[in-house]
Image (cartoon, grey):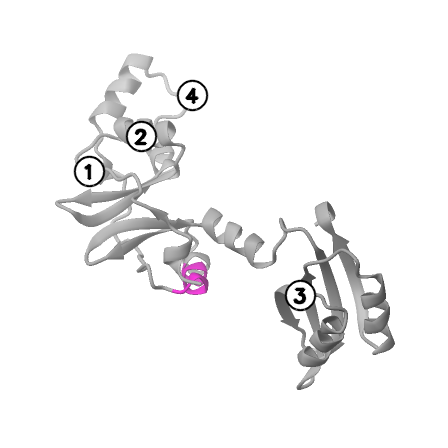
Amino acid sequence: MNVRSRMTSNPHIISPDATIAEALELMRKNNVRRLPVVKNGALVGIVTEREIQEVSPSKATTLSIFELNYLLSKTKVSAVMTKDVITVTPDTLLEEAAVLMRDNRIGALPVVESNKVVGIITETNIFDAFVDLLGFREIGTRITVEVEDTPGILADVAGVIKGFGANITHLVVYRSSLGKSVIVIRVNTTNTDDMIIALEKQNYKVTSILKNGDI
């Protein structure tokens, strides 16, 4: 899965010469927390709601509302934006984007193609992809099985499930350092009682069974 499949296309952008009051209004109007900053078609920075709040006077200030509005209307986006922006392309793998966000402690990455901002990928987009990857919102059963981490074990477990005519719709494997693996399998049926019994007869430890709206 790549960034293109999950990014928000044609994001709202702002000029570095715009004021932070204009930036705030654009964010609030469109319910976004970040704006790529673009000048002459090229990305020159990114401004976030948090950055604007950090430079805005606190509620304890002695300034009047008129003075506050004056400051917000005179301070430019270029004065508060982050200039060294980490970007990705639409073809960047989603997990690469997630690692970049995690390692750099940022919540979004502008998506650039041919020197043009074509999208933005945020932590919310990553979370939604994770939810979809595990099929949490789909009808069926989520079965968690603890197994020995040995070659062919996944095929064996899948073979048991196949014997009941069920289709595996999602699958994730978590490996531990103790020679064990946890396989999280989602099947497209809720009639899994006999399937669970068959798995346990094969000495597979079923640790969790979640069906339908329970997931």
Please tell me which residue is depicted at 20% across the width and 26% down the height of the picture.
74
In this rendering, which labeled residue sits more in front, label 3 or label 4?
Answer: 3
Check disc 4: other Cα within 10 Å, few if <14, some if 14-19, many if 20+: few
Q: Are marks 1 and 2 in contact (CB under 8 Å)?
A: no
Instruction: Tell me the crowding category of disc 1: few under 14, some 14 to 19, or many 20 or more residues within 10 angstroms, Cα based.
Output: many
Q: Nearer the viewer, mark 4 or mark 2?
A: 2
Instruction: Mark 2 or mark 3: name the one nearer the start of the chain.
Output: 2
Quadrant in which residue 160 is drawn: bottom right
- Looking at the rendered structure, which numbered label has been put on residue 63? none
Q: Tell me the CA gap for discs 4 and 2.
A: 26 Å
Residue of label 4: 60
Amino acid residing under circle 2: Leu
Label 3: few (<14), some (14–19) or many (≥20) C-alpha neighbours in 10 Å: some
Amino acid type, mark 1: Ser
At numbered mark 3, what does the secondary structure look like: helix, strand or loop?
Answer: loop
The residue identified by callout 3 is 167
* Camera sees residue 56: yes
Dot 1 or dot 2: first in sequence order is: 1
Which of disc 1 and disc 3 is earlier in sequence?
Answer: 1
**Mark seen at residue 26:** 2
The reply, left or right, for residue 185 in relation to residue 34 is: right
CB atoms of marks 3 and 4 within 8 Å: no
Q: Nearer the viewer, residue 49 or 154?
A: 154
Q: Earlier in the sequence, mark 4 or mark 2?
A: 2
Identify the magenta region. 93-100
